[in-house]
Image (cartoon, grey):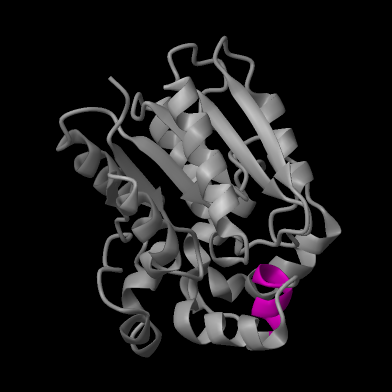
Amino acid sequence: MKPDTIVLIHGFWVTPRSWEHWITHYESKGYRVLAPAYPGFEVEVEALNADPTPIEELTVPAIIASLEKLIDGLDSQPIIMGHSAGGVFTQILLDHGYGAAGVAINSAPTEGVQVIPLSQIKATFPVLKNPANRHKAVGFTFEQWHYAFANTFSEEQSRTLYERYHIPASGNVFWGSALANIHPGKDDNYVNYHNDDRAPLLFIAGENDNLMPPKIQRSNAKHYTSNTVTEVIEFSGRSHLMPAQEGWEEVADRALAWALDHS
């Protein structure tokens, strides 16, 4: 029995609204589509920009617990797809035994992935330049957003999506991820790369992604040494905000087809 439910997990600096095209696309194909918000993010973009307190209070364990509770309430294991930080949460969920198959799109790295391209340093500098940001919700200016998320979009398209999607990101979670390879022991973005019981996992990378470039996806995939399927697909001409970029249907259909073939 093939999965009939798809769970879409958003990343940082955006909310489930960023999946709006994929939700209607998959629903039109007959799938039940769930796009949960992080805890406290259940309000609209405008409300989170006005009061970022839920962003400041965010933790990875709380995100994972809420996602696991959601999936526990389903009758069968879904296809899990995550974008950016959502790609990390997808990997963690698969490692915890959830999902019939997983797709990580322009994924942030899990613990142990030490590739740090120059474009990523520039894209994340607004958060990491000041240690005090660890206790704040940190937003992008439009110029920073355009470089990190939408560098292959026209300025008009990029600005429209900035106004529609952008919210601050959790400095606490972001700094924790950045320091994960320094701290002893397991951090919040840890996965067991040797887990033979993990569901199949596909990484989708965008050729021109400045925030999470393809070399991060490829390095992350190579860390998996388990006897499970782990593959990487790269789409040319794509930037970080792939779910909203022109031609997103091709990515959505490829992701779904792969997940169905491997579930």
Indicate whether residue 21 is drawn in magenta: no
Is 69 situated above or below 95? below
**Which residue appears at 74% of the width and 72% of the height?**
151
Indicate whether residue 149 is drawn in magenta: yes
Is 120 situated above or below 93? below
* Quarter of the figure with residue 101: top left
Residue 219 is left or right of residue 5, and the answer is: right
In depth, the one of 75 and 52 nearer the eye is: 75
Residue 102 appears at what percent x and percent y? 46, 34
Residue 207 appears at what percent x and percent y? 78, 52
In depth, the one of 243 and 171 nearer the eye is: 243
Residue 231 appears at what percent x and percent y? 64, 27
Residue 57 is left or right of residue 214, and the answer is: left
Check the picture and name the quadrant holding the C terminus. Answer: top left
Bounds of the magenta span?
A: 143-150
**Visible in this render: residue 6?**
yes
**Which residue appears at 36% of the width and 90% of the height?**
50
Residue 162 is left or right of residue 21, and the answer is: right
Check the picture and name the quadrant holding the N terminus. Answer: top left
Is 218 situated above or below 30? above
In depth, the one of 83 and 189 nearer the eye is: 83
Q: For the stretch drawn in magenta, what is the main secondary structure? A: helix
